[in-house]
Amino acid sequence: MSATLYAIGVGPGDPELLTLKSVRILKEVPCICVPKGREEGSSLALDIVSKAIDLKNKEILQAHFPMKKTKSPEHIYSLDAKWHETVKIILSRLNKGLNIAFITIGDPTIYSTFFYLYDRLLELKPDLKISILPGISSINASASSAAISLGLADEKIAIIPATYTDNLKDIMNTFDTIVLMKVHKVLDKIISILNELNLIDKSIYISNVGMKGEYICRDIRKLNKDELNYFSILIVKK
């Protein structure tokens, strides 16, 4: 029987938000592949999993992918080399008949590194068995913690990486709910736009959702900018 690669969304932080199926598969597989942004850093995804299952006797494959937002040829080449290295390691285990779980924070289909891996694996092994297990995204978890609806009836929802938007005013004017992800570096710019559009009081900031130190701020004028972090979301609900 051919081996299977499982892409598993482990949720935003709380191990109790893992699905029953994800926990079962994680217990069954002998290998777990863990993406990391820094070689010397820890993995939040693995930390979540370690609180749900026993990692003893599991082979942990660490995949390091520098999270630098640049399109320079040197960086692209470096990332391609890293992905190729990880692909070879994963295929070596799969070719031995070993199932592997590739774990990712949140959901594998929403801004996840998994699909860079997915395309490369299928190029080399088109008949590879891949099963994607959804996870609770920080988007859903944030809305739940803030007790707000993201959309009702015919309301339109936009999900935007905050650092990549040059037409935020147009988006704000077009959609009923706007979810801005990773706002920590551009919050001043976003607040200026929200003030201009009279939407400052329609905005909720959530950070570290599902983790220790989860924080919700319903008056973003009072945010301490020194305490902003990577795991931050701003929901604008008209």
Image: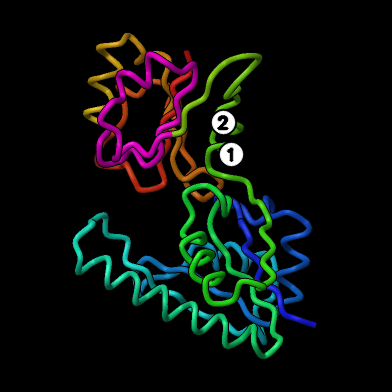
Q: What residue lies at 28% left-to-right and 73% top-to-bottom?
A: 78
Q: Secondary structure at mark 1?
A: helix
According to the picture, the residue beneath numbered tag 1 turns out to be 141
Q: Does the magenta-highlighted stretch encompass residue 104? A: no
Residue extending furthest toward the bottom: 96
Label 2 element class: helix
Q: What's the residue type where badge 2 is placed?
A: Ala
Residue 95, image x and y in percent? 64, 87
In-image side of 53 versus 50 (left or right): right
Residue 37 position (above or below residue 200): below
**Magenta residues, as a range?**
160-187
Give the side of residue 76 with respect to residue 43, left or right. Answer: left
Q: Are marks 2 and 1 in contact (CB under 8 Å)?
A: yes
Q: Residue at image x 57%, y 82%?
A: 91
Q: Which quadrant would residue 7 be assigned to in this image?
A: bottom right
Relative placement, left or right, of 50 versus 183 is right
In three-dimensional space, the C-alpha distance between marks 2 and 1, rounded to whole angstroms, equals: 6 Å
Q: Position of residue 87 (x, y in %)?
A: 49, 77
Residue 137 shown left or right of residue 197 in the figure: right
Name the kind of residue labelled 1 in the image: Ala
Query: Which percent across, then down, holds residue 119?
Result: 51, 64
Q: Is residue 185 magenta?
A: yes
Numbered-mark total: 2
Q: In this view of the protein, which residue sits in the foreground, 20 or 63?
A: 63
Which is more toward the observer, 132 or 208? 132
Q: Please rate how many residues cluster around mark 2, counting C-alpha atoms within 10 Å: few if below 14, some from 14 to 19, many from 20.
A: some
Residue 27 occupies which quadrant of the picture? bottom right
Mark 2 — residue? 143
Q: Position of residue 107 (x, y in %)?
A: 58, 51
Q: Nearer the viewer, residue 202 or 133?
A: 133
In-front residue for pair 227/112: 112
